[in-house]
Image (cartoon, rainbow, N blue to C red):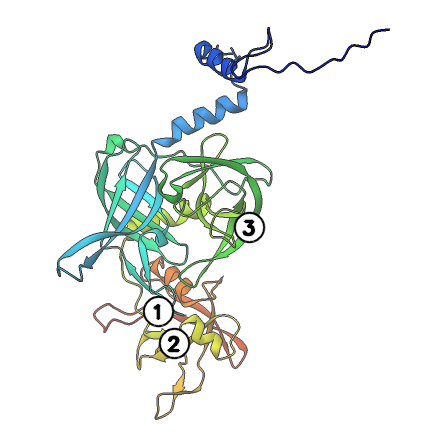
Amino acid sequence: MRRWLILPLLLAPGLRAQGKPSEAEVIAQSRKAAKPRAIAPRGALFPAEQNLVKLFKTSKGSVVHVNALVENVDRYTGQTGLVPAGLGTGFVWDDQGHVVTNNHVVTVRLDQDREAPIAITADEVRVSLADGKTYKARIIGRSLAHDIAVLQVFAPLDQLRPLPVGRSADLQVGQSVFAIGNPFGLDHSLTTGIVSALDRTIGTDFGSAIKGAIQTDAAINPGNSGGPLLDSAGRLVGMNTAITSTSGSSAGIGFAIPVDTLNRIVPMLIRKGAEELPLLGFQTFSSDRTRSFGIPKGVLVDAVERDGPAHKAGLRGTLRNAFNQPVVLGDVIVAYNGQPVDTEVELADLLAFHPQGQPVVLDILRDRQPLKISITPGSRTAPKQVI
């Protein structure tokens, strides 16, 4: 019986088994056959997608890029020029060329590492429209307490399309909302989400608290500030203002000033502009200083002008010793015309909208006892006071 010894077939380099291409041949063949792939047909977009595309196309032209600039002296040449100091978003409010944004977009904060950073108003504001054209703008009114600024943009009015205004009082948790803005300078970015919560209270850079804020998980990042929050009908329901995040970027918790607040404050800012506060004849401590005296809420009265309106009404200021140190604390203002007040910024903001010639009614705490004081504002021929 014969036994066969089967040995492996050894191929010389460059040879291959018959019928099986080498790796190099496979790659060469695929290179020759390379061409664009056939496009797979698809049907129409889903109704929700169609609505979103339409919403963006319709609203995009109403959203602007806001660039705040400050004067800077070159340390080497000594020449003065404008340099960018803040970027944000804004939206067209009406057909008169007014754009609304956050006040912190056009207010530059210096020395951020300080306990009390210095805030200065931008020396110039420029607004870029959706077509890329840039125009000069001026700040014509602002509310520190509500973090709102109104700009007059010197662009052709037919290039400025106002957004339709909705209502924030009708919002419900869970309904869809959309944010358009310029996150990190990337203009006209759209993000989507829902109303996560209502009636939130958020702090501002100016020591006040915005009440009734809308919480949303639509992505909001630095640069989105001042942009519109829209409902599914494309109506303005809020202005994106702040985020809560440990990284400084969107963590799905953003906040917007409700449109009902905007619709109340913005017309007053346009109408009143930089009109002076009513002359009441008293000054207050800052919120931080007030809290340092162990006063948990309200505004502590500092100096009261002798024979001024507040003095005549009986408002008491803080008494100081020979070294100018407070020794007897004055009245604490806790409400203005029935509206609670917690900071000097909120008080000044409310007084800015006070009806001319009408008495100012303050709720105060004196020795922890509640009192009401009615102050009739004085004439502006008297020396100008802080409040």
Measured as percent of width and height from the top left, residue 12 is found at 55, 15
Q: CA distance from mark 1 to mark 3?
A: 34 Å
Q: Secondary structure at mark 1?
A: loop
Residue that numbered label 3 is attached to: 199
Q: Earlier in the sequence, mark 1 or mark 3?
A: 3
Q: CA distance from mark 2 to mark 3?
A: 36 Å
Please tell me whether mark 2 or mark 3 is closer to you in this view: 3
**Whether residue 35 is visible:** no
**Could you tell me which quadrant the N terminus lies in?**
top right
Furthest-right residue in this view: 1
Circle 1 crowding by C-alpha within 10 Å: few under 14, some 14–19, many from 20: some
Q: Quadrant of residue 74?
A: bottom left
Q: Residue at x 68, y 16 (%)?
A: 8
Q: Can you tell which mark lies on residue 313?
A: 2
Residue occupying the point 21% across, 70% down: 381
Horizontal side, residue 26 vs residue 95: left or right? right
Q: Residues within 10 Å of mark 3 (few under 14, many from 20)?
A: few
In front of the other: 259 or 52: 52
Question: Mark 2 Cα within 10 Å, few/some/many (few <14, many 20+)?
Answer: some
The quarter of the picture where the C terminus appears is: bottom left
Q: Are marks 2 and 1 in contact (CB under 8 Å)?
A: yes
Position of residue 336 relative to residue 167, above or below, is below
Query: Residue 34's x, y, as percent?
Result: 45, 12
188 or 358, which lies in front? 188
Q: Position of residue 41 (x, y in %)?
A: 51, 10
